[in-house]
Image: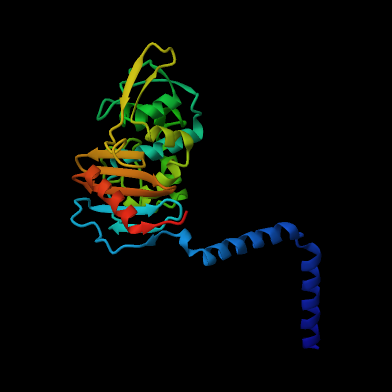
Amino acid sequence: MIARAIIASIIILTFTAVVFLPKTDFNTSYLTEAKTEATVAAIVQNPEILPKRISTYQDPQQLTAKSAIILDAKTGTQLFKKDPDLKHLPASTTKLMTALVALESCSPEQVITVGPVEKEGSQMGLSAGDKMTVENLLYGMLIPSGNDAGMVLATSCARSYDQFIARMNEKAVELGMTNSHFVNAVGFDNDFQYSTAMDLARLAKVAVANPLISKIVDTKSTVVTDVTGKKTYFLENVNKLLGNVEGIEGIKTGETEGALEILISKTTRNNNSIIVVVLGSKHRFDESKKLIEWAYKNYFWSE
């Protein structure tokens, strides 16, 4: 009797599931599975889609950088690393996160009236009362690394500055930046503001996926104005690699007394892109160039 009761229960549960569960879209399910299988097959049949090391050329030696990483931008493959998860002051590379968060709430065309101006560190040259588009503030923050422009964006593209910082940390979690935390929007040294080479490489990959940010960080110098066209700002990029290294496309410098020298770079050659991060360096431009050249000498990508 017990056995019959159990069998009856199983039949009832099966019938209920068939009748009441949501219908599966067979075509969608089939296409999804087929697409997944095709992707897996492509990877198995074409392992060359991953960068392959083709040389035994010696790994970069005697870097002054405390932490460094080279990532293949397409696959995320690590081509070189030196303590990539070491927590470190991020300095002005913070501004890449500030740019992403600002563009979530403010459109590039939006006009902002500048309030009190941050005077510490590098400047775009803003004055209280200037009326600026968000786009031109982004130019001022990312090219000469203007703290004044960064603080204006952070105080204008959220209900409050604290809310903006909170959103920066939420965004870090969303991007998988598990070893990063922010307490200010421009990169001032603080014991509670930190990131890693790995996390900054992740941030850079997302940042340059935004066409506007990608365009700005690849700009060597430019001139922008306020909305009246009467006040002019001459902007010069701090990144000395721009125009001096084949395929360089930005991304962001950083330097403070505590952080030492930092550089995030993106380089593309023959349609193959790498992201290089050096943290805590004494020679960020030379060491980044060394890592870039090393990567392209040692790795092969299929066309």
Out of 16 and 269, give the one closest to the viewer: 269
Q: Is residue 288 above or below residue 82?
A: above
Q: Is residue 223 above or below residue 175?
A: above
Could you tell me which residue is drawn at 22 percent across and 50 percent down? 65
Q: Is residue 76 above or below residue 151?
A: below
Left or right: where does residue 169 sit relative to residue 257? right
- State the image quarter where residue 80 is shown: bottom left
Where is residue 105 drawn, in percent x and y?
50, 32
Could you tell me which residue is drawn at 33 percent across and 40 percent down? 93
- State the image quarter where residue 283 is shown: top left
Could you tell me which residue is drawn at 70 percent across and 61 percent down? 30
Please say whether residue 24 is visible from this viewpoint. no
Where is residue 300 drawn, in percent x and y?
39, 58
Where is residue 91 drawn, in percent x and y?
28, 40
The quarter of the rendered structure image containing the N terminus is bottom right
Out of 102 and 252, give the one closest to the viewer: 252
Q: How is the image coloured?
A: rainbow
Q: Is residue 160 above or below residue 89?
A: above
